[in-house]
Image (spheres, rainbow, N blue to C red):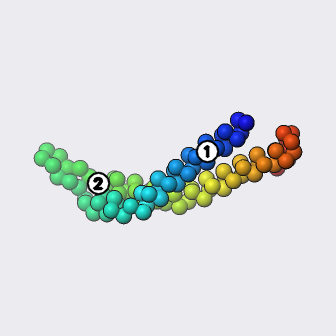
Amino acid sequence: MSNLATAIVSMIGTAMWLGAGAYYKSNASLKNYTCGFGSFKFPGHAINMQGLCGELEYVTWVLIFMGPLELFSSATVGWAIWAAKKKRGAYARV
């Protein structure tokens, strides 16, 4: 039961992570807003928006490369649970 709970929590976390990444990737107005301004000038100091723009680009590339790897690892855990149940609770050679 513990392995199943771990797999379920892992899949929920992966789905939330992929959903958040897809939202920020598809939200073009957020990227245009942050990357369109070099900095905001307020009385007394300026705020650099290029750091946030770089983080949005980083999230995009991490989502592209790590998303399929996360899904593959979750599928491997599911396959291992299925193989263990097929052997009726005994350790299975996978």
Q: What residue type is labelled 2?
A: Met
Mark 2 burial class by Cα count in 10 Å: few <14, some 14-19, many 20+: some
Indicate left or right for 73 with 42 as reference.
right
Q: Are marks 2 and 1 in contact (CB under 8 Å)?
A: no
Q: What element carries label 1?
A: helix
Residue 62 visible within the image: no
**Residue at image x 72%, y 49%?**
78
Please tell me whether residue 57 is drawn above or below residue 84 in the rendered image.
Answer: below
**Residue at image x 40%, y 54%?**
55
Please tell me whether residue 68 is drawn above or below residue 74 in the rendered image.
Answer: below
Q: Is mark 2 on a helix, strand or loop?
A: loop
- Precedes in sequence: disc 2 or disc 1: 1
Residue 2's x, y, as percent? 70, 35
Q: Which of 19 and 40 is in front in this view?
A: 19
Residue 71, quarter of the rendered image: bottom right
Indicate left or right for 24 with 38 as reference.
right
Indicate left or right for 43 with 19 as reference.
left
Please tell me whether residue 1 is drawn above or below residue 86 in the rendered image.
Answer: above
**Residue at image x 38%, y 61%?**
27
Residue 7 visible within the image: yes
Mark 1 burial class by Cα count in 10 Å: few <14, some 14-19, many 20+: some
**Residue at image x 57%, y 56%?**
66
Residue 85, quarter of the rendered image: top right
Residue 58's x, y, as percent? 44, 56
Q: Which amino acid does label 1 sit on?
A: Ser
Name the residue carrying label 2.
49
Residue 35's x, y, as percent? 31, 61
Name the residue carrying label 1.
10
Q: Distance between the residues labelled 2 and 1?
A: 33 Å
Please tell me whether residue 45 is drawn above or below residue 18 in the rendered image.
Answer: above
Residue that lies at the very extreme toward the top in this rendered image: 2
